Image (cartoon, helix red, strand yellow):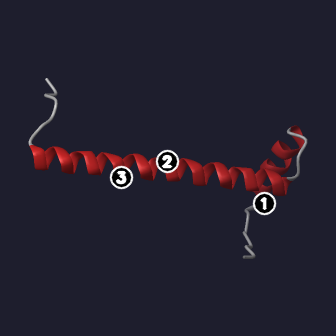
Amino acid sequence: MAVSLRVPPEVKKKVARLARAQDTTAHAFMLEAIREKVQVDEARAAFHAEGKRRLARMKRSGLGIPAD
C-alpha cells in the first residue's frame, strides 16, 4: 500500500532537524512516529473497551465498590 503525505514545510523542517539529531533519516523518523501513535491509540481503545465491559458487568450484577 503506497501512502503519500502532505507535510507542511514547518513540520518537514522539524522532522529533518530531529532526525539528524537522532542520526536517522526523516523517513525512518516519521515511520517510528506513526508506529508510536498507532500503539498509543490501540492501547487507549483497549483501555476504554475494557472499562465499558467492566461497567456493563457491574450494572448486570449490581456488584461494585462504593466510591465514598
Q: CA distance from mark 3 to mark 2?
A: 10 Å
* Residue closer to the observer: 45 or 12: 45
What SS does tag 1 mark? helix
Q: CA distance from mark 2 to mark 1?
A: 31 Å
Instruction: Kindly identify the residue that appears in the image at 26 percent across and 45 percent down.
Output: 54
Q: Amino acid at mark 1?
A: Pro
Q: Amino acid at mark 3?
A: Ala
Which residue is labeled 3 in the image? 49
Total tally of numbered discs in the picture: 3
Q: Earlier in the sequence, mark 1 or mark 3?
A: 1
Q: Earlier in the sequence, mark 2 or mark 1?
A: 1
Kindly identify which numbered label has been placed on residue 9.
1
Q: Residue 58: image x %, image y %?
A: 17, 43
Q: Residue 23: image x %, image y %?
A: 91, 41
Where the C terminus falls, by quadrant? Answer: top left
Q: Is residue 62 left or right of residue 35?
A: left
- Relative to 8, say whether 25 is above or below: above
Q: Residue 59: image x %, image y %?
A: 13, 47
Disc 1: CA contacts within 10 A as few (<14), some (14-19) or many (>=20) = few
